[in-house]
Image (tube, rainbow, N blue to C red):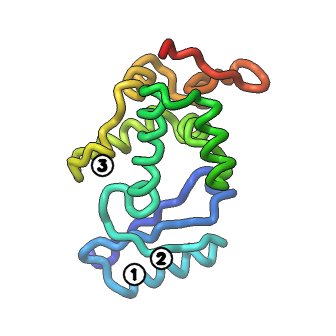
Amino acid sequence: PDRFVGLHFFNPVPVMKLVEVVRTIATSQETFDRAFAFAKAVGKVPIAAKDNSGFIVNLLLVPYLLDAIRALEHGVGSVPDIDKGMALGCGYPMGPFTLLDFVGLDTTYKIAEIMFAEYREARYAPPPLLKRMMLAGMYGKKSGKGFYDYSTTPPTVTQLGL
């Protein structure tokens, strides 16, 4: 167990520089240091993360993405307006719905389920709309339709009947 360590790469791996180096309660310092050095050697920027659901990035990112869906469910704004607002207002490279479609609605749903099971905090509970879309086979870019419809160029907003 002292030689076990996690490396959490982000997609797309060739573009994203970050790697979360995950230490278990049994990981030795030598193993952790070797994994950290490996991440640097392959051109990544490593950060140390505790072995918990979501590590660092997803612990903070998932509630943001789920809150965007809840805002849409409550009629706070449209998909493109929420995307533009967060991208331009916060300096993010893309809005939450574009990111959700990229990551995959099925992937996001599963991550949220796992995090909710561990933390039992409402902010990690998958919103009803996410579940309905996932069950309808709307996974985002990988299925051709999510919050956006990728069968057209440029993609158009999917009509969700909200």
In the rendered structure, are the residues bearing label 2 and label 1 in contact, judged by CB atoms less than 8 Å apart? yes
Choose the circle earlier in sequence order: 3 or 2. 2
Name the residue at 74% across, 19% down.
Answer: 152
Query: Closest to the observer: 84 or 97?
Result: 84
The answer to whether residue 59 is left or right of residue 120 is: right
Amino acid type, mark 1 = Thr
Which of the two marks, 3 or 2, is nearer to us in this view?
3
Q: For the residue labelled by badge 1, is the local secondary structure a helix, a strand or a loop?
A: helix
Q: For the residue labelled by badge 3, is the local secondary structure a helix, a strand or a loop?
A: helix
**Residue 25 in the image: x percent, y percent?**
25, 74
As measured in the structure, the alpha-carbon distance from the residue carrying label 2 to the one carrying label 1 is: 6 Å
Amino acid type, mark 2 = Ala
Q: Identify whether 79 is placed above or below 96.
A: above
Residue under circle 1?
Answer: 31
Choose the circle earlier in sequence order: 1 or 3. 1
Name the residue at 40% across, 47% down.
Answer: 63
**Residue 61 in the image: x percent, y percent?**
46, 52
Quarter in which the N terminus is drawn: bottom left
Which of the two marks, 1 or 3, is nearer to us in this view?
3
Query: Closest to the observer: 92 or 102?
Result: 92
Count numbered badges in the picture: 3
Residue under circle 3?
Answer: 115
Name the residue at 58% across, 36% down.
Answer: 82
Query: Closest to the observer: 75 or 29?
Result: 75
Query: Closest to the observer: 129 or 21?
Result: 129
| Label 2: few (<14), some (14–19) or many (≥20) C-alpha neighbours in 10 Å | many
Q: For the residue labelled by badge 2, is the local secondary structure a helix, a strand or a loop?
A: helix
**Residue 24: which quarter of the image?**
bottom left
Q: Residue furthest top?
A: 161
As measured in the structure, the alpha-carbon distance from the residue carrying label 1 to the one carrying label 3 is: 26 Å
Task: Determine which of the numbered discs, if any, sits on residue 35 in the image.
Answer: 2
